[in-house]
Amino acid sequence: MDKTEQSWRECLGIFNIESATLLWQSSCDAFRRIYAGNEHIYKVVDLRRETTSNLRVQDLAGEFAILKNCEGIQGIPSATAHLRTGQYEVLVMKGVEGVPLSKLHIGWFRLLSILAKLSIILLKLSWRGISHNDIRPDNILITDDNSIYLVDFDQACRTTFIGAIARQFFGINTGVIKVHGSIMSILRNYILGAMPPRVVKILRRLFSRKAREKLRALPVLRDDASFQIKTLLKAWQIAQESDANSPGQNLAYYSLSLEGYCFPGERPWCDRWNMLRSITDYSGKRILELGCNMALLSTYLLKYSNAGAALAVDIDDKILESAKLINTAFGVKASLKVQNLDAPDDWESELIDFKPDIVFALNVLNWIQEKQRLLNFLGHFQEVIYEGHDGIDVESSRLRSVGFQHIEIAGLSERGREVIHCRR
């Protein structure tokens, strides 16, 4: 028996549930599990070794408190206990025997019947000021008598009645906590799944074209606009003209709102920054940002996180003109370098000579031909913050292969990709 299994046996013994059966283990965190036994469900966490708590709005104590607030609502599992030792924590709920909606092949009539019953549960939740925030087919259980249960409240939050309605039925983000699924998203996905693939492809092209047209519209500045805003407008004009993002589509990579102006782009910078800023201590550190695009990350680390120095690297020289203007707008100065990471020249030595303390490689490896070369380069450093396109198991294996021993999921991007904090 390996040490992980020994640890879980020890945990089950502490809570006197040795006979419980393993139902589920997180694919990206071996130290979060769900067990079933004695007509109960046990959500169990190894507090010292789990790595994905930051992906959840509620810890087990918070989830227990929310479930207690839901008592009396038919269709919500009943929480019976929350227990904690120095290393382990468990949430105990009464068991529900049902099949996830995601596992059922059903017609439209039954789907609408299920969603109607679910809507009643959500109205009652909303009345109590609770939003589930993760209404997906995996979290909707259908029992043998066609009762509906909504499970897994680790993304839930407290809000107003109107806020909960907006979030749970329409998927509208009414605050900083993200909505991962709603009644509307389930309906949309079922509609798309029922359509011929060719029709779906045409619709996606149509709506993506309309979205791009909206994204391209730069703000019109008032006469009293500040120097910073005028400089940012020039930076976004250059970013739209460059080929660094969606060549030929006139799309900047990031969107940014400041002083009442919205500079449009494909990805909201505010969401990205709120996640990246808290991963580690950047104070006084030398930062290397690979595939920097507009270099907003380097700029913000210098401006708001007291980074000591920053070197931002990208293959596109025009986007670095935009990055230079953004630096100017925020009153900082990152070093900017044009570099093709697939070029045969020894770019590694020059970047190593910068002596970075922290290296960012976000959404870079997927676009590189010589992937192992880039991975080997990352292996030179003590601390790397990395985002890939493949699953967490694949990316973790790659990072371990170049010497990183401590690999933790720091958060999820708004595109659902894991951002990984690596240390040697």
Image (cartoon, helix red, strand yellow):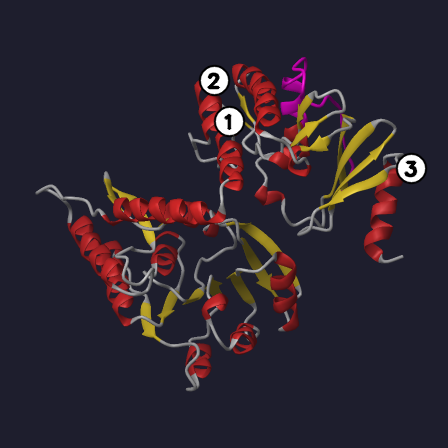
Which of the pair 172/84 is nearer the observer? 172
Tag shown at residue 247: none
Quarter of the figure that contains the C terminus = bottom right
Residue at point 78% right, 28% down? 97
Image location of residue 283, percent across then percent down: 44, 57
Tag shown at residue 19: 3
Going by the numbered disc 2, the residue's amino acid type is Phe
Dot 3 alpha-carbon crowd within 10 angstroms: few under 14, some 14 to 19, many 20 or more: few
The magenta region covers 64-87
Image location of residue 129, percent across then percent down: 52, 19
Which of the pair 77/114 is nearer the observer? 114
Q: What's the CA distance linking mark 3 and mark 2?
A: 42 Å
Q: Nearer the viewer, mark 3 or mark 1?
A: 1
Q: What's the CA distance linking mark 2 and mark 1?
A: 11 Å
Q: Which residue is mark 1?
A: 168
Q: What's the CA distance linking mark 3 and mark 1?
A: 37 Å
SS state under label 3? loop
The answer to whether residue 159 is seen in the rendering is yes
Going by the numbered disc 3, the residue's amino acid type is Ser
Q: Residue furthest bottom?
A: 345
Residue at point 91% right, 37% down? 19
Answer with mark 2 or mark 1, whichever residue precedes in sequence.
2
Going by the numbered disc 1, the residue's amino acid type is Gln
Answer with mark 3 or mark 2, whichever residue precedes in sequence.
3
Q: Which residue is mark 2?
A: 161
- Asked if residue 332 is positioned above or below residue 53 in the image, the reply reads below
Q: Is residue 86 magenta?
A: yes
Answer with mark 3 or mark 1, whichever residue precedes in sequence.
3
SS state under label 1? helix
Residue at point 47% right, 61% down? 362
